[in-house]
Amino acid sequence: MISIRPATNPDLDGLYRIAEDMAATNEKNYFERCLSEQAEKKRVVLVAEQTGRLIGYVQLIWVPLYATFRRLDIPEIQDLNVIPDARGQGVGALLVEACEALVREAGKFEVGISVGLCQSYGAAQRLYVKKGYIPDGAGMCCDDVPVRAGELRSTLWHRAASLDSLLTLKLIKNL
C-alpha cells in the first residue's frame, strides 16, 4: 500500500536518496531549506511511502517564481520524483492528487505545474495531460520566463543547470 504524507526532518535521508536515484542536482542543504519553508507555510513537501520506504516526493509552492502563476495566485506543483523501480504503480498520480486536494482545501480553484520539454519528461507529460492539465498559453519557458519567438538566451549557456531542467512548459488545471 502506498501512503502520501507531509515530509518531516527524519525523512531527509530518504529524500536525498530519491534525489540521488533520480540523478538530481540540488544545492547543498536543499531539502533542509524546503522543510524550513514548509514550516513557514511557503511550500508543502509530500512523500510517498511504501512498506516504510520513501519512493517519491513532490512539492507544492504557494507563491511560485513563475510570474503568471504568482500574479494569478495559482500555487505550483514542482519537483515530482518517483524512483525508477516504483514507477507504473500510480505513485506520481497519487502525489499530484494530494497536491490538488491541498489546493482545494486552501480555497483555490486552479493549480499549475511545470514539465520539462526533453524526452526524459515524457512520462510526466503524459501524466499531466491525463490528469487534465493544459498549457497556460505562454509557450516554452526558460528558467520560469516565457521565451518569445526568435529570442536568444545567452545566460542559459552560462548556468550550471542543465538545459532539460530549464526549458519547461507551464500547465494549468481548473479544480
Image (spheres, helix red, strand yellow):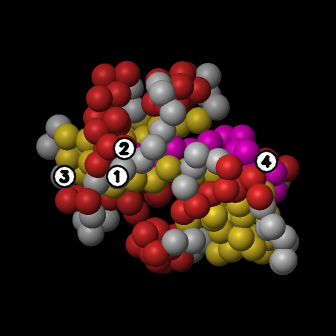
Residue of label 4? 70
CA distance for labels 1 and 2: 5 Å
Q: Nearer the viewer, residue 138 or 111?
A: 138
Q: Nearer the viewer, residue 22 or 136?
A: 22
Question: Is 62 within the magenta?
Answer: yes
> Pointer 4 and pointer 1: residues touching (CB < 8 Å)?
no
User: What type is the residue that disc 1 sits on?
Assistant: Met
Discs 2/3, front: 2
Q: Give the structural element (helix, strand or loop) at label 2.
A: helix
Residue of label 2? 19
> Pointer 2 and pointer 3: residues touching (CB < 8 Å)?
no
> Pointer 1 and pointer 2: residues touching (CB < 8 Å)?
yes
**Residue at image x 19%, y 52%?**
1
User: What type is the residue that disc 3 sits on?
Assistant: Met
User: What type is the residue that disc 2 sits on?
Assistant: Ala
Residue 34 point in image, percent of width and height: 52, 30
CA distance for labels 4 and 1: 28 Å
Residue of label 1? 22
**Residue at image x 62%, y 42%?**
61
Residue span colored magenta: 57-69
Q: Earlier in the sequence, mark 4 or mark 1?
A: 1
Instruction: Using residue 48 as the reference point, say whether residue 152 is left or right of it.
Output: right
Instruction: Using residue 135 as the reference point, say whether residue 160 is left or right of it.
Output: left
Residue 147 visible in the shown view = yes
Residue 122 point in image, percent of width and height: 45, 75
